[in-house]
Amino acid sequence: MPDESASRGVDDNPARNERLADELAVMINRWGELLYVDPASNPNLDFDDSNFGHAGRPIVTPWWLIS
C-alpha cells in the first residue's frame, strides 16, 4: 500500500490539518453513508479511530454470516 505521507509529508501543522479536514469533508459530502459500506474497505478497521485501528466488531457483516 502506498504511503502518501512519504511524498507529501504528515498533516501535523495547521495548514496541512485544514487541507486534510477539507479533503475529508469533500469525501463525506460526495459519498456520505456509502463510505461505510465500501466493498473495498476493510471491515476490521474502525472508522471512528483517526488511525483506523482495529474495530471491536466488523462494520459490515460478512455475506456468509447473513441468514
Image (cartoon, grey):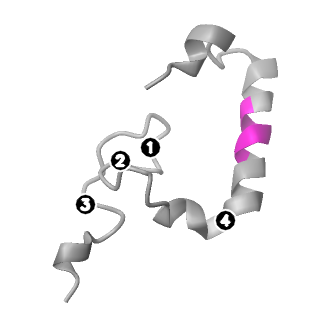
Q: Secondary structure at mark 3?
A: loop
Q: Residues within 10 Å of mark 1 (few under 14, many from 20)?
A: few
Q: Which residue is mark 3?
A: 57
Q: Which residue is mark 4?
A: 32
Q: Residues within 10 Å of mark 2 (few under 14, many from 20)?
A: some
Quarter of the image for residue 43 reads bottom left
Q: Which residue is mark 1?
A: 49
Q: Main secondary structure of the magenta part?
A: helix
Q: Amino acid at mark 3?
A: Arg
Range of the magenta residues?
20-24
Q: Secondary structure at mark 4?
A: helix
Q: Is residue 51 above or below residue 47?
A: above
Magenta segment includes 30: no
**CA–CA distance in space, label 1 to label 2:** 8 Å
For marks 4 and 2, the one nearer the N-term is 4
For marks 3 and 4, the one nearer the N-term is 4
* Residue 65 x %, y %: 17, 77
Q: Secondary structure at mark 2?
A: loop
For marks 4 and 1, the one nearer the N-term is 4
Q: Are discs 1 and 2 less than 8 Å apart at CB?
A: yes
* Residue 33 x %, y %: 60, 68
How many numbered marks appear?
Answer: 4
42 relative position to 33: left or right: left
Q: Amino acid at mark 2?
A: Leu
Q: Nearer the viewer, residue 14 or 30?
A: 30
Q: Amino acid at mark 1?
A: Asp
